[in-house]
Image (cartoon, rainbow, N blue to C red):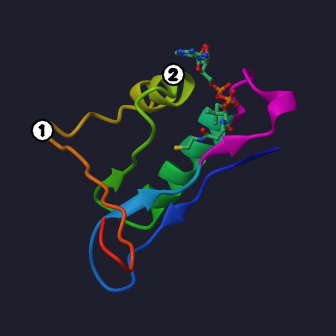
């Protein structure tokens, strides 16, 4: 009913907790927090020194879960996206 996983880089770099989600019919029961905590436990067992995560700044429940699990915001980080098309623009 819920999913979260550790995402490893191909060679080197940060380890991330990947797409955390829970079934819409079972939300608000602590399932997402539980599975994300389980991923963090796996990271500890594997000797991973830190785990990164990111999410939509308007996703209240996920921001709340991350805060409760002890994630801290990386100061000054801004992400930009550029659409690339064959004819420019
Ligand atoms: C975000 C998502 C994973 C939450 O799943 P969930 O099983 O309902 O989460 P939990 O029950 O473990 O925890 C939800 C927490 O958010 C809180 N919450 C709910 N709505 C909230 C809101 N609008 N603002 C802040 N907190 C909120 C709940 O009170 C609960 O906290 P608590 O246990 O301290 O009371 C789920 O809504 C989902 O799958 N969304 C779609 C996928 C997604 O957005 N994933 C995140 C990708 S990074």
**Picture quadrant where residue 28 is located:** top right
Mark with earlier residue (2, 1): 2
Which quadrant of the figure contains the C terminus?
bottom left
Q: Which of the pair 65/34 is nearer the observer?
A: 65
Q: Which mark is residue 65?
A: none
Q: Which residue is drawn at 40% across and 48% down?
A: 53
Q: Say which residue label 2 marks.
A: 60
The residue that appears at 57% across and 44% down in the rendered structure is: 36
Residue 3 image point, x, y percent: 69, 50
Tell me, yes or no, whether the highlighted magenta stretch contains residue 26. Answer: yes
Q: Is mark 2 on a helix, strand or loop?
A: helix
Disc 2 CB within 8 Å of nearest ligand 1 atom? yes
Point out the image quarter for the N terminus.
top right
Q: Quadrant of ligand 1?
A: top right
12, above or below 14, in the image? below
Q: Which residue lies furthest to the front in this view?
A: 87
Residue 64 in the image: state x and y as whole percent.
48, 22
Q: Is 88 contained in the magenta span?
A: no
- Residue at left offset 76%, top offset 26%: 27
Q: Which of the labelled discs sits on residue 76, or is there none?
A: 1
- Other residues around mark 1 within 10 Å, as few (<14) / some (14–19) / many (≥20): few
User: Height in image: 18 above or below 36?
Assistant: below
Q: Nearer the viewer, residue 44 or 2?
A: 2
Residue 11 occupies quadrant: bottom left
Read off the magenta span. 20-31
With 40 as the anchor, is 75 left or right in this view? left
Residue 26 image position (x, y, % from top left):
83, 29
């Amino acid at each position: 009913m819920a999913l979260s996983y550790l995402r490893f880089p191909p060679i080197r770099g940060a380890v991330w907790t990947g797409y955390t989600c829970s079934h819409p019919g079972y939300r608000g029961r602590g399932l997402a927090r539980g599975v994300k905590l389980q991923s963090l436990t796996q990271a500890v067992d594997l000797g991973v020194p830190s785990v990164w995560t990111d999410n939509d700044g308007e996703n209240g429940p996920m921001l709340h879960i991350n805060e409760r699990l002890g994630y801290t915001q990386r100061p000054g980080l801004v992400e930009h996206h550029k659409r690339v098309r064959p004819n420019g623009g």
